[in-house]
Image: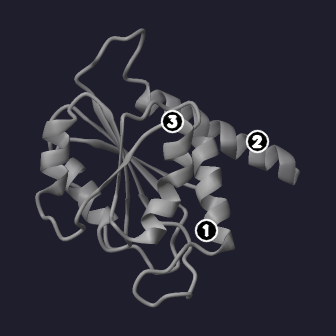
Amino acid sequence: MDTLKMKMTKFLVIFISLVFFTGQHIYGQKHDLTTFILVRHAEKSNNHPQDPDLNNAGLLRAQGFAEKLAYAHIDVALSTPFKRNRQTLDPVAKQKNLQIIEYDPADKNLIKRTYKAHKGRSILIAGHSNTIPGYVNQLASTSLQQLDESEYDKIFIVTLKKMGKGKVLILKD
């Protein structure tokens, strides 16, 4: 299969998955299914040791992420205060006219509180290699391990009706 066909196939799989897993609001009806879309921030530069921006590859990944989510319904976008996380979500937030809500990555009750506050909605969260797997584990009672420092290409989609009982779909960008 040539490269263009492979890219189109990959795009269609991601598109169909996102529409299926985030299509909760059909004709204005709210359902009790909650969807979390969780991503690690995109590739970072080395311009600042404590709070780096995204590098060119990261900016491209963030834009591609927004393109993949173009037809997904998203109600809430959450990011840590770090620039790399906000910059990962900026294209999606602009596209969907969402305000990015900051959260503290050390907050142990973030996921439970977010689920309770936004039940029946779609929530997009940008986090870190050491937080995103833990969030997925809380939502779905899985045992994912910390992401490798070189892993930026996973999108975790968790759908649930009850905390800790979610179904997980892991897409590779």
Q: Residue at x 48, y 36 (%)?
A: 97
Place of residue 51 in the rendered image (x, y in percent of width and height, measured from the top left): 42, 81
| The disc label shown at residue 84, or none | none
Q: Secondary structure at mark 3?
A: helix
Closer-to-camera residue (53/57) = 53
Left or right of 99 on screen, residue 141: left
Closer-to-camera residue (58/131) = 58
Left or right of 42 on screen, residue 73: left
Q: Residue at x 29, y 17 (%)?
A: 30
C-alpha span from label 3 to label 2:
23 Å
Place of residue 8 in the rendered image (x, y in percent of width and height, measured from the top left): 76, 42
Q: Residue furthest bottom?
A: 49
| The disc label shown at residue 96, or none | 3
Based on the displayed image, in which of its 4 quarters is residue 25 positioned?
top left
Q: Is residue 24 above or below residue 135?
A: above
Q: Of tags 1 and 2, which is closer to the observer?
A: 1
Q: Is residue 3 visible?
A: yes
Query: Mark 1: few, some, or many residues within 10 Å (few <14, many ≥20)?
Result: many
Closer-to-camera residue (56/128) = 56
According to the image, label 1 marks what residue? 58
C-alpha span from label 3 to label 1:
20 Å
Q: Amino acid at mark 2?
A: Met
Q: Amino acid at mark 1?
A: Gly
Q: Secondary structure at mark 2?
A: helix
Query: Mark 2: few, some, or many residues within 10 Å (few <14, many ≥20)?
Result: few
Q: Is residue 171 above or below residue 50?
A: above
| The disc label shown at residue 8, or none | 2
Q: Residue at x 51, y 60 (%)?
A: 88
